Amino acid sequence: MKIKKRIDCASSYPVFNQVYTGFGRSSLRFRTQRHVVAICLYAALSACGSVSAPSQDPDRQPVNDINRLDQLWEQRRRVNFTNDYPLGPGDVVEVNVSGVDEFRNLTERITGEGVLVLPFVGRIQAKGMTDKELRAEIRRRLETNYVRDPQVSLFVKEFRSRQVAVIGAVQKPGLYNLASPADTILSMISQAGGPTATAAERILLIPAEPAEPDKAKEIISAMPIRLLSQDPSPLILKNVEPLTISVDGVNKTGQEKYLSMPVHPGDIVLLPGAGEALVQGWVARPGAYKISPGLTVLGVIAAAGGLAFPADSAAVEVIRNNSTGHKFKIVANLDAIIIGTDADVPLREGDVVDVLASNPKLFAWGFYRFFTTVVNVGASVNAPIR
């Protein structure tokens, strides 16, 4: 196949149209500010695409995306796993102390600043502690000032700080708690019931990487209104451009290993819907066709009833948007694909397959249509009887 230069520029990256399937209909309500802010910022910041043509092959994943994936993969693999996950803002704990009425089924939420306030104990910076460490600190403070050998039990009722959003074309979109730091992208998708039959063959990941303080302040100052009552700086992400993990089963990309990448609290995993491809030009049945796994140019033309006589089978064009919003063309030679000398072109949502006409065939077809319509119509007119 051949790549031709881009033909125009789109104004935005259409990822949220792609992930509507399985998300918009689910009436999913995000319960954490981190995911709300991340998605809002993504929609705002990704709306302005570059107007210059990409330097690399536009049909391939950008090199900087692959580099970001590799860096994130190595960074998260180096994290030392522990059996207990640290507590964080929004988590709800229940504390009981034998013989102390004030601590009978006492339920408190860790504040946005990561502080837990308890009677007789005061303020504890609970963010980053495990439940065992927090229990030990509560026991130490009570024993120091109030109770001899206190018997403290602590139960975490809600893990709001451990949530990962899994949305898009999955069976059960929503927010899911991390059981341990070893949870991966694949395990979170499994918790959401797995992909639907309409899911595309790629996964989008927005990592929860807070931006540098100066950059966060710059973004907050540019907002027309204050979105949150508390300081939103920790919720401003370093990079809201999603990382694309290709799981294309037709063209092996070698990116399946990234499905075992550990996820962190605040990550957003999006499975876009496969959508439709449009077929126009010289085919029997032009129209929109659902993208199924493994659908290619040859397959969608067969679904469209095959080529009409004037079609140029050696120059079928696939018009596609790349990740920056630019349109470009891929020219597929169906004759070469059929005999195996050229690779078939897998289709993506939003592709337009344009079957152009061959000039010699079109000329011959014109004569054929002339004699089968105009001449036949003229011959069928009844001559007057004299």
Image: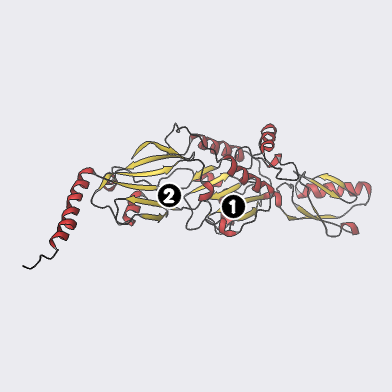
Q: Please, what secondary structure does the residue beneath circle 1 have?
A: strand
Task: Classify residue 14 as left or right of residue 224.
Answer: left
In the image, what residue occupies the spot 52% across and 50% down? 17
The three-letter amino acid code for the residue at tag 1 is: Val
Q: Is residue 134 above or below residue 69?
A: below
Asked if one can make out residue 294 in the rendered structure from this viewpoint, the answer is: no
Q: Earlier in the sequence, mark 2 or mark 1?
A: 1
Task: Classify residue 348 as left or right of residue 122.
Answer: left
Q: Which residue is mark 1?
A: 166
Q: Which residue is mark 2?
A: 249
Q: On the rendered image, what quadrant is the C terminus found in? A: bottom left
In the image, what residue occupies the spot 56% across and 45% down? 205
Q: Nearer the viewer, residue 83 or 44?
A: 44
Q: Please, what secondary structure does the residue beneath circle 2 have?
A: loop
The three-letter amino acid code for the residue at tag 2 is: Gly
**How crowded is the residue under tag 1: few (<14 C-alpha within 10 Å), some, or many (20+)?**
many
Q: Nearer the viewer, residue 117 or 3?
A: 3
Q: Is residue 329 above or below residue 19?
A: above
In the image, what residue occupies the spot 7% across and 68% down? 385
Q: Is residue 97 above or below residue 251?
A: below
User: At which x and y percent is residue 317?
Assistant: 34, 44
Asked if one can make out residue 8 in the rendered structure from this viewpoint, the answer is: yes
User: At which x and y percent is residue 369?
Assistant: 19, 54
